[in-house]
Image (cartoon, rainbow, N blue to C red):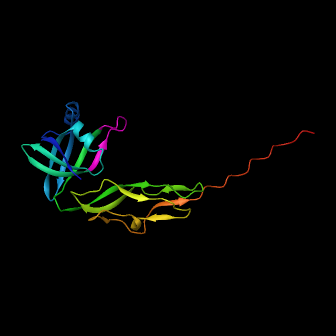
């Protein structure tokens, strides 16, 4: 995974008024924390951040004017309830070689066995521990030819090198269920004499 470079500025005003002003100026307020350092309150370029956050667990290099560069991952993203625009982001400082626990999307490929079986997705993402600079964008699982009653557990997922499960291996991720039997059509009520 490559890192995305974004520019940011330190902010020294807080509260709703300053946050609204930042958003009007095409900036997104955020806070950087981790590794025992004091939190840094920043404003990040809004459009670049929005585009970067389309990739889950993106690695960001924030070039902070007058504050150096920080390597971070987004930890919490707050969105406006109606507009769905990003209103605030919490960033976690990471270092190359450091392990982090993140949620990675689970993606299926292939087709189920014939017979009208249905795939029930129990988990859309899975917690894994991986190096901060090599976070997988997704974990792909093949469902090719699975029959009714088959279950894919977390331990069945093929993880990239250097990535380990952060959940119990017996956790069910997907299962294949047989289609429900249709009830026969109700007979016509009453007959003419």
Q: Nearer the viewer, residue 36 or 153?
A: 153
Judged left or right of residue 67, residue 140 is right
* Count of marks, rendered view: 0
Q: Is residue 84 magenta?
A: yes
**Quarter of the image where one finds residue 156:** bottom left
Q: Tell which residue pokes out farthest to the left in this image.
A: 66
Q: Nearer the viewer, residue 87 or 126?
A: 126
Q: Is residue 74 above or below residue 11?
A: below
Q: Position of residue 165 (x, y in %)?
A: 33, 65
Indicate the quadrant containing the C terminus: top left, top right, bottom left or bottom right: top right
Judged left or right of residue 130, residue 33 is left
Q: Residue at x 29, y 46 (%)?
A: 77
Q: Position of residue 69 (x, y in %)?
A: 11, 48
Q: Nearer the viewer, residue 113 or 120?
A: 113
**Quarter of the image where one finds residue 138:** bottom left
Q: Tell which residue pokes out farthest to the right in this image.
A: 193
Q: Residue at x 21, y 41 (%)?
A: 29
Q: Position of residue 163 (x, y in %)?
A: 29, 64
Judged left or right of residue 180, residue 85 is left
Q: Nearer the viewer, residue 14 or 65?
A: 65
**Quarter of the image where one finds residue 131:** bottom left
Q: Position of residue 143 (x, y in %)?
A: 47, 59
Q: Is residue 53 magenta?
A: no
Q: Which residues are magenta?
A: 75-85
Q: Residue at x 29, y 56 (%)?
A: 136
């Amino acid at each position: 995974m490559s890192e995305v470079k974004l520019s940011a500025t330190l902010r020294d005003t807080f509260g709703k008024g300053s946050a609204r002003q930042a958003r009007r100026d095409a900036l997104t307020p955020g806070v950087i924390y981790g590794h025992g350092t004091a939190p840094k309150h920043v404003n990040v370029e809004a459009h670049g951040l929005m585009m970067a956050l389309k990739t889950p667990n993106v690695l960001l290099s924030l070039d902070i004017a007058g504050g150096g560069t920080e390597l971070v991952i987004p930890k919490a993203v707050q969105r406006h309830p109606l507009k769905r625009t990003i209103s605030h982001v919490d960033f976690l400082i990471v270092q190359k070689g450091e392990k982090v626990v993140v949620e990675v999307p689970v993606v299926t490929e292939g087709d189920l066995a014939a017979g009208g079986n249905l795939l029930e997705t129990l988990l859309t993402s899975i917690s894994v521990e991986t190096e901060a600079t090599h976070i997988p964008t997704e974990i792909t699982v093949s469902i090719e030819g699975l029959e009714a009653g088959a279950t894919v557990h977390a331990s069945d997922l093929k993880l990239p090198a250097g990535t380990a499960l952060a959940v119990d291996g017996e956790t069910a991720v997907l299962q294949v269920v047989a289609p429900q039997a249709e009830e026969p059509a109700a007979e016509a009520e009453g007959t003419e004499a």
